[in-house]
Image (cartoon, grey):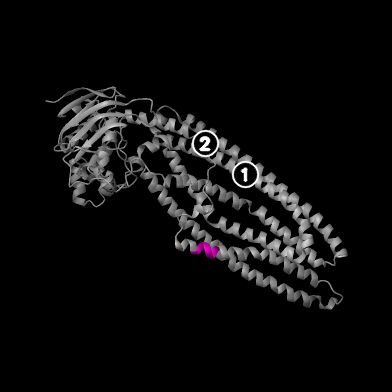
Amino acid sequence: MGDEAMRDRGEEEETGATKRKDAGATKKVAFFGMFRYATRADLALMGVGTVAAMVNGMSEPLMTVVFAAVIESFGGSDNSAVLHRVSKVVMYYIYLGIGTALASFLQVSCWTMAGERQSARIRSLYLEAVLKQDVSFFDVEMTTGEAISRMSADTVLVQDALGEKVGKYAQLLTTFVGGFVIGFVRGWTLALVMLACIPPSILSFATVSRLRAQISARRQASYDDAGNVVEQSIRAIRTVVSFNGEKKAVALYNALIKKAYKATVLEGLVTGLGIGCIFCVVFCSYSLAFWYGAKLIISKGYTGGQVINVVFAILTGSMAIGNASPSISAIAEGQSAAHRLFEIINRKPKIDISDTSGIVLDDIKGDVELNNVFFRYPARPEQLILNGLSLQVPSSTTMAIVGESGSGKSTLISLVERFYDPQAGEVLIDGINIKNLKLQWIRGKISLVSQEPLLFMTSIKDNITYGKEDATLEEIKRAAELANAANFIEKLPNAYETMVGQSGAQLSGGQKQRIAIARAILKNPKVLLLDEATSALDVESERVVQEALNRIMVGITTLIVAHRLSTVRNADCITVVHQGKVVEQGCP
């Protein structure tokens, strides 16, 4: 779009980012809600992984039973039989080892595969959802930097939560339950005494988990803001360099990273304190357990092996809760990340490109009309951009729209492309309200060439065919010829297979613009929108590009937003827009 539209977008993004600050940072989906995109194959993998995790989790409580039996084997009056008794018992360790190895393999592999499959599906759905959002979504609700950050960071958190961490949690939960069951079966009196140690452990764990979730949300918000700085600085790298803004960008980025660093340090301190408290409780439990166990040996006839079994079974179960803290924290972070991702995936855009309803005609003539249109940008509802504007552009007419900066010229282009809908009035194509036409179909009839042509980091051929992937090589070459691009393309070493680089960095401004024009031509549009298409070019590049535009505008309804006389002098009509209204119009 033109300078006007770019300035509007910049202001709207800044306002929108302020409104979104810290909004919904601690919201999360339900645990089972994270698995909403699981297939039957995923459910089968998770089922096998869960059973394996439970088997794996029981290995430690069962180990305490075997350990107690070993202790008992060392007793007895016949010392010569000790080796025989111990040899029989230690075989159970071998059986446990084999079973645990198989269970661990199935647990980790199944949960990792299930997590990767689901996260890949979520990534695809998220990207699809972001791309189908209306333009106002990026003005008010999310910046491009935030969208990229969620794709790169939140999907990793969700993958972690959906995968091995859930299996680990199931394993540790089984260890907890199994340890307490064995402890109560082997000696319920001593087990009850040891229960007094559980509340302090649970309190420490719950406090740490809650604080970590809050700190993690603040840290991620800082990383999102830092990502925005990087994205904006790289996108506007020429502006940053020309105004010596490198230090300012780095300083702003470092300030945001410092906030994230402080949150991470605080999270580490909280976690360390919590783990320290848990271990303090554990060692105090040892002291209490062995002291009371000695009393039970004297008064209740407990054996040494029985006391050892109960103590280590209960402590093993209790420590499993402490060891589950990283898994629970990862799952909690995954739930928060899933909420942010699913919120976008489930969002219904106001202007939905995937909506299959709407009128589809055999073709259109290209009559364009704006009837008493009022419009305000969503990010600046207090500022009226179009104030009852009416404009008619007959089919095959070239209409130049001129006016001072901020008068609403580029906004007209946005409304005809249906990037936005007006708050009042109508935008009509061939007399039909554009809202009633199938959006994807009508956009296929319209081509837009902006001031700053955006090329993708792929070949020239792929950039030209972006709007028509089934185009033949002859059609591509014909479009390039009409755009005055064929000569320079064919002189390149790889011709149409030449890679253009990041944002077309390997090409000049005029070359990029001609490829953008070829891309627009290839769609064979009925309506052509030119938004300051030559304003950023030098005189020679402008001449070549203008020749191409003059050639393709014949027989096509064309709306030109421009300031230069050379751009508008071949127009059939010229319309002057001032303060959101048409104030003058002239046609030969």
Earlier in the chain: of badge 1 and badge 2, it is 2
Quadrant where the N terminus lies? top left
Question: Secondary structure of the magenta portion, mostly?
Answer: helix
Q: Looking at the image, can residue 384 be seen?
A: yes
Q: Nearer the viewer, residue 460 or 327?
A: 327
Q: CA distance from mark 1 to mark 2?
A: 17 Å
Q: Which dot marks residue 253? A: none
Q: Which residues are magenta?
A: 44-49
Instruction: Indicate the position of residue 580 as horizontal and vertical percent values.
Output: 28, 24
The kind of secondary structure element at disc 1 is helix
Instruction: Indicate the position of residue 391 as horizontal and vertical percent values.
Output: 21, 29
The kind of residue tagged 1 is: Arg
Q: Quick check: 205 above or below 387? A: below
Q: Is residue 278 left or right of residue 331?
A: right
* Residue holding disc 1: 210
The kind of secondary structure element at disc 2 is loop
Q: Quadrant of residue 378?
A: top left
